[in-house]
Image: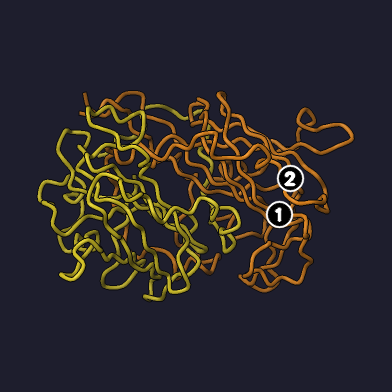
Chain colours: A orange, B yellow
Amino acid sequence: MSDLASFRLPTLGSQPDYLTPAYTSTVKRSPTQSLILLPQSLSELTGPVFGHERVGKLDHDLTKQHAGEPLGERIIVAGRVMDEDGKPVPNTLVEVWQANAAGRYQHKRDTHDAPLDPHFTGTGRTMTDEDGNYRFLTIRPGAYPWRNHVNAWRPAHIHFSLFGHAFATRLVTQMYFPGDPLLALDPIYNSVPDMRARERMISTFELALTEPEFALGFRFDIVLRGRDATPMEK
Amino acid sequence: MTKPATTISQHITTPSQTVGPYLHIGLDWLTTSNLVIPETEGLHIVLQGCLLDVDGQPIPDGMIEIWQANAHGKYAHTDDHQVKTLTQNFMGFGRLSTDEQGGFRFSTIKPGPVPHHDGSIQASHIMVQVFARGLIKQLVTRVYFPDGDHSHDLVLKHVPVERRHTLVASTTKDNPNVFHWNIALGGENETVFFTI
């Protein structure tokens, strides 16, 4: 018998539908049949656990991966990974990737006519600490065009990948910046039904995270699924 | 079934967003298509197939992650309290990016059976999550083995009989330890995906 509490389904309205026709790539890449709801077993309640030794000391600093300094506005992105009940998620892997300051990815498939930065790869990773906190140092990414529709531009964003404590808590999301006029026009951001959930993806400027004479600070707290109050079966 | 929420959430869950087309920048460093070393305990197998879109076209910019128990049916996780032996150097996690033909190939071991929450024993299976541009959140599924006794598996009982075959890998006589299994987002053999 399982002595583990299951994870609750994510907050209603917090997750986008697979088929979001305004984001045209979803049309050919969404399952056509309904998903089947399952009770959770050990297979869902466990998941890969990575040790702190998996990340290098400077992996959280995207400005120090090359001989020179990348161009652009240095920023600090920090926050806390927690569950829906506010409990911290400690010692979990956080992976990020992003475009450079000009809105160009260091990727063979990115053909946007904006300069690459030889001093910026746009890849980072870190582990949360005992209280679920993480911190990255990077460059503010640029917006970039995509061919989803005429004159389509993605709002500046940083991709985040998280595992949490279990297979069931796996999350890949994107962090956006406050006040970005492109957010209102973006089908990916707007795929989320609940406005408050959408706004959870927008980081907030925070003076306390800002380092004088060095870099602006943005807070991005990330909320993973919470557990039921009691184990499913005893 | 999963119970409705018994606790009111203080915080809204962060929404999922697509990995996009440039996922490799951030995620390829952790590529683990071979989960084993020659000495790893258990039946060494290959799990391979293609990731296909609703029209059966390959998805060449996808990512697949797997999670599985060891040969004894124990997960390398502190919440697995079963009295079973852990396998040294076997984590049970795999990740890879699909190739130009949408292909994937993992080398691993066949997992042992693990119990469900009611104490019933599940047939041997590997947990799978799929990520791609155009997938706004990941897809969750499982793959089973053709020789297993599937009749008592609580998860398969949730799946309509006519769709269960989409969760079972196939093999050939030439290569009994190489398992083929496609992940199809549509068509006649659309894979069953789950909400967990």
Question: Would you name the residue on which mark 1 appears?
Answer: A156
Q: Nearer the viewer, residue A191 or A124?
A: A124
Q: Residue at x 45, y 55 (%)?
A: A17
User: Are callouts 1 and 2 both on one chain?
Assistant: yes
Q: Which amino acid, mark 1?
A: Ala
Residue A138, labelled with which disc? 2
x, y percentage for residue A212? Answer: 87, 31
* Secondary element type, mark 1: loop
Identify the chain of the residue marked 2, using the numbered disc in the image: A
**Is A157 placed above or below A112 here?**
above
Query: The N terminus of chain A is located in which quarter?
Result: top left
Q: Residue at x 73, y 59 (%)?
A: A143
* Secondary element type, mark 2: strand
Q: Which amino acid, mark 2?
A: Thr
**Closer to the observer: label 1 or label 2?**
2
Q: Residue at x 36, y 75 (%)?
A: B56
Identify the chain of the residue marked 1, using the numbered disc in the image: A
